[in-house]
Image (cartoon, rainbow, N blue to C red):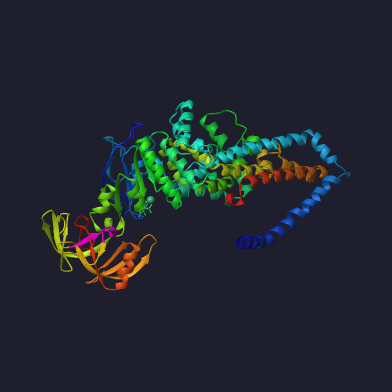
Amino acid sequence: MQQPGRAAEIKAIGIGKSFGSFRALDDLTLDIGRGEFLTLLGPSGSGKTTFLMILAGFIQPTDGRLYSDGVDITERPAEQRAAGMVFQGYALFPHMSVEANIAFPLKVRKKPAAEIKRRVGEMIERVGLKGHEKKLPSQLSGGQQQRVALARALVFEPGVLLLDEPFSALDKGLRGQMQAEMKRLHQETGTTFVFVTHDQSEALALSSRVAIFNHGKLLQVGAPDEVYDRPDNRFVAEFLGEINMLPLKGVRPANNGSTGLCEDRAISMRCKAEKVRGDAILAIRPEYMSIAREAATGENGIAATAVASTYLGAATRLDLTTRQGAKVTISVPNEVAASALSKGNSVWLTWPAEKGFLLPNGGQ
Amino acid sequence: MRAYLSDRMGAALLMAPLLLFLVLAYAWPFLGVVKWSFTLPTPGLGQYNALLTDQLVQSVFIRTLRIAAIVTIVSVVAAYAITVVWVRGTPVQRVVAEFCILVPFWISVLTRAFGWVALLSNRGLINTWLQAVGFISEPLALVRNEFGVIVGMTHFLIPFAVFPLASSMRSLDDRVLLAARGLGSSRMRTFWSVFVPMTRSGIIGSALIVFVFSLGFFVTPAILGGGRSVMIAELIYLRIFQSPDWGLGAAISVVLVLFVGALMALLFRYIRPKQLV
Ligand SMILES: Nc1ncnc2c1ncn2[C@@H]1O[C@H](COP(=O)(O)OP(=O)(O)OP(=O)(O)O)[C@@H](O)[C@H]1O
Ligand SMILES: [Mg+2]
């Protein structure tokens, strides 16, 4: 964070934060790589903002250490860390014009006037605010204010840019547009981005890695496809999208993966049965399941009855129940749903062995 | 729209008795004063003419404006510091500040003026003490002059300056201050280039209130000025009660009321009444 113009590498070791007796963050250890786009994802109150504030230096952690490029910055005050930060609600200076807002970090660094003028001009161009230089924040639309906040946070070339739910106040269309723009800004600047959201699709779409929080704990960190396809636990699996769960018995390792029994049918999986033995839960994302008239021996499949359908336009959502009462939801082409329902009789649900994964039985 | 209307109606109904009282107690008698200014001692604009030529009246006007300006600046600066502590200090600091702001309201303006006399006069606490320590040999002239008037008025008006400032500081978004610090600005710099400008409406409101109050001050200047630092309200009093010059006294009153009215109009242009409390 100390060398302007260079992306920072951040290391958090055992970070904890208590507010009185309340534990807002607990034993968080995380490496944030140089130039990476890391998303902090989690439900409300999970400690995302708290962690971001600790990174920015606005909150002192109660435990743990924080390193930037190998230097301990745990006690360094916020104005010396100079992380770029975009707050929820933008926090623009209401009494300053767009131009003055963006120039502010350069002015406090006592840059020469000519340089400030040039860099502010470039930044305004880059975020598409040309023609709005003289306006006050209150005269801008939400999306434009968002751009000012981004420009102000990036203009001094911070080693890391911290963003706290920057798009939560924007409507859906604008949100998509701003997401694309932020991805471009990340590529252009090469700066390390740490981005907070509680929208999982936003997290998966934008980031190079996703860190999932719950109740002040970091549950899993990994690339989007990694956390989506191979979640470590039930919370992560459910938080990242819809998932079907089937009870599995007698789980044991098998050649190239593992095997178990689901409603008396042998099921095979590519994943290793390291953490689980005996009873477990088999989890499969709905988009990997399909409907078949029958399942061949050796193929993963389970008998189920279609009970309801919801027309979604491009596809139909089909609710099914297995013989032993497990509920499964999948998304199928419209005509498949119609035929499955009209027969009213049992169909087979099948899925490829590499798409099912094991979760520990019970809670998390 | 309907909610807005009924809101307005409700407010009007609640305010009606007050308005009636104001009309009966102030507006009506004031019309009488206006009449005097044009009719006493002889009908015409003679008194207003005299205002423009009378050296004494003019010097009192100028002194009043000068004192009001100084009192305004000192009060607003002092009130600003107190309000920062009151609104943004630690819990203990807040309680202490609140105490300092509210206690003056319980003590009458007269008591406070005489208190200042006791402190500032030639044989008062401050002079006796300074002489005892040996800092000075002759007592300092701290009272019965403009200095005494300014001290007394400032002391009285600081609490009134606090409220508009407090409301503007309370409505300020903390994240904006955090943002400034995160962007590399020191505490000092954040205070001067973000905090102070963002409380501008409070500063304007507070300055106008203090200034308008100062213009009409009577008791404090009369006691602490000791007749040597006469302000406009005292001059009006003297003209009406001590010399049979009602016409001139009335004309001065009319000018003062018009001036204050113009200032109030300015005040409400800049800030909405809600921001004052
Ligand atoms: N200053 C504070 N004092 C006491 N508790 C706090 C304070 N700041 C945060 N908390 C608590 O810490 C927990 C984590 O808060 P945090 O703001 O980090 O959540 P978040 O993940 O950002 O949630 P959201 O998605 O709603 O913004 C919350 O339960 C919150 O109530
Ligand atoms: Mg938050």
When asked about the image quadrant of residue A249, the answer is bottom left
**Residue lying at 35% horizontally and 64% vertically, measured from the top left:** A334
**Residue lying at 35% horizontally and 54% vertically, measured from the top left:** A45
Quarter of the rendering occupied by the N terminus of chain A: top left
When asked about the image quadrant of residue A274, the answer is bottom left
| Residue A192 appears in view | yes
Q: Residue A130: horizontal and vertical position, in percent? A: 51, 37
Q: How many marks?
A: 0
Q: Residue A156: horizontal and vertical position, in percent? A: 41, 33
Q: Nearer the viewer, residue B36 or A101?
A: A101
Magenta region, residue range: A280-289
When asked about the image quadrant of residue A54, the answer is top left
The residue positioned farthest toward the right in the image shown: B42
Q: Nearer the viewer, residue A285 or B46?
A: A285
Q: Nearer the viewer, residue A128 or B215?
A: A128
Q: Residue A206: horizontal and vertical position, in percent? A: 35, 46
The residue positioned farthest toward the bottom in the image shown: A344
Say left or right for A264 vs B138. Answer: left
Q: In the figure, B144 relative to A217: above or below?
A: above
Q: Nearer the viewer, residue A181 or A217?
A: A181
Q: Is residue A123 magenta?
A: no
| Residue A220 appears in view | no
**Residue lying at 63% horizontally and 63% vertically, measured from the top left:** B6
Q: In the figure, A284 relative to A39: above or below?
A: below
Quarter of the rendering occupied by the C terminus of chain A: bottom left
Q: Residue A339: horizontal and vertical position, in percent? A: 31, 69
Q: Is residue A288 magenta?
A: yes
